[in-house]
Image: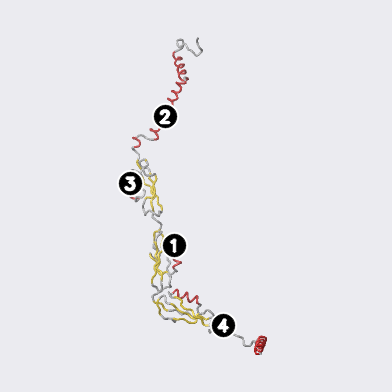
Amino acid sequence: MRHDSDIDWAETDPAERGVTGWRLWVTSPRHLVVTIAGAVMFGLLLGYLVAVLFVFPPHNVAADLRRVPDLVGRPVEEARRRTEREDLALEEALAIHHAQPLGTVVAQEPLAGQMARPGSALRVTTSLGPPERPVPDVVGLSREQAEMILLQAGFEVEVTRLDASADVGQVVGVRPAPGTPVVLPGTVRLLVSAGASSVQIPDLAMQSVAEAEATLRRLGLRLGEVLEDSASLAAPGTVLGQSPVAGEQVARGARVSVTVAIAPPPAVDSTTPPDTASVRADTTMTSGSNE
């Protein structure tokens, strides 16, 4: 029995027989799988060829590229020589850097190990070194004021005390000298007066106790015993006398005693009449006891 799909190959044209055979081969399930697999393999091969020829150049193309050297941490002059050996051009930018010294490469682009074409630019950032700042002039200020100014400017502070005629606690010198550039965070030494080794006693008369104590402290002396005098007509709290006396030379740290005026005690009013009721009560109690 002959079906419609049957073909009389003998009666067909050879060209027609070829087309018809191809159609029958492709539409066959088994042959279709083979066709798809072949198309996939062809696509993979084509992708590989594109990658080899265009994305990753062959050896004869890659041979013209230059490997970027590692320049970070090297002096800029050495970085320039290494860049020239690789036939690359060095482009330099400057930046302040707290950790790296002046003239050191701190960054680069492209990164080390990458490939670059001959003559292409290799950009590096070179350190200008840590920031510098001139030492401020704090001579004549108190230690507290000088320390605050230096710390706010970014310096570290050390204090050295020495004998000086200036008031105790006053800054009499700075090391390095004011105006000297110092790399931050550099150390500035304050020379602070501890007072003279021998001190002349100041005149404290008519000062308050608080003023007298401040005066003695500035000279490296200390306030000693405070005596009171109620017989003076001076304002209460005023210094009347001192020991040792003004002008006497004493060692630094000596104590100075002062005598201070105080208000006199309240006076008794003798014009006030006696309390007669109390007197009569006392008399009655005495008479009763005698009986």
Kindly indicate the quadrant of the structure image that contains residue 247.
bottom left
How much space separates mark 1 and mark 2, taking CA atoms?
69 Å
Label 3: element kind: helix
- Residue 100, percent across and down? 38, 53
Amino acid type, residue under disc 2 in the picture: Leu
User: Where does label 2 land, which residue?
Assistant: 44
Depicted 188 relative to depicted 229: above or below: above
Label 4 vs label 1: CA separation? 54 Å
Query: What amino acid is found at the position of numbered circle 3 in the picture?
Result: Arg
> How far is disc 2 from disc 4 in space, using C-alphas?
118 Å
Please name the residue that numbered disc 1 is placed on. 151
- Whether tag 3 and tag 1 are in contact, CB under 8 A, the answer is no
Rendered location of residue 87, percent (x, y):
33, 43
Residue marked by disc 3: 82
Q: Earlier in the sequence, mark 3 or mark 1?
A: 3
The amino acid beneath tag 1 is: Leu
Q: Secondary structure at mark 1?
A: helix
In the depicted structure, whether residue 74 falls above or below residue 162: above
Reading the image, the residue beneath label 4 is 265
Q: Nearer the viewer, mark 4 or mark 3?
A: 4
SS for callout 4: loop
Q: Residue at x 56, y 82 (%)?
A: 265
Dot placed on the residue nearer the N-terminal end, 2 or 4: 2
Query: What's the amino acid at mark 4?
Result: Pro
Give the label, 2 or 4, closer to the camera: 4
The alpha-carbon separation of the residues under discs 3 and 2 comes to: 42 Å
Residue placed most toward the observer, 124 or 1: 1
Please, is residue 107 above or below residue 173 in the view?
Answer: above
Query: Which structural element holds mark 2?
Result: helix
Q: From the viewer's perspective, is the residue at label 4 or at label 1 nearer?
A: 4
Left or right: 1 as drawn, with respect to 75: right
- Residue 82 visible, this orientation: yes
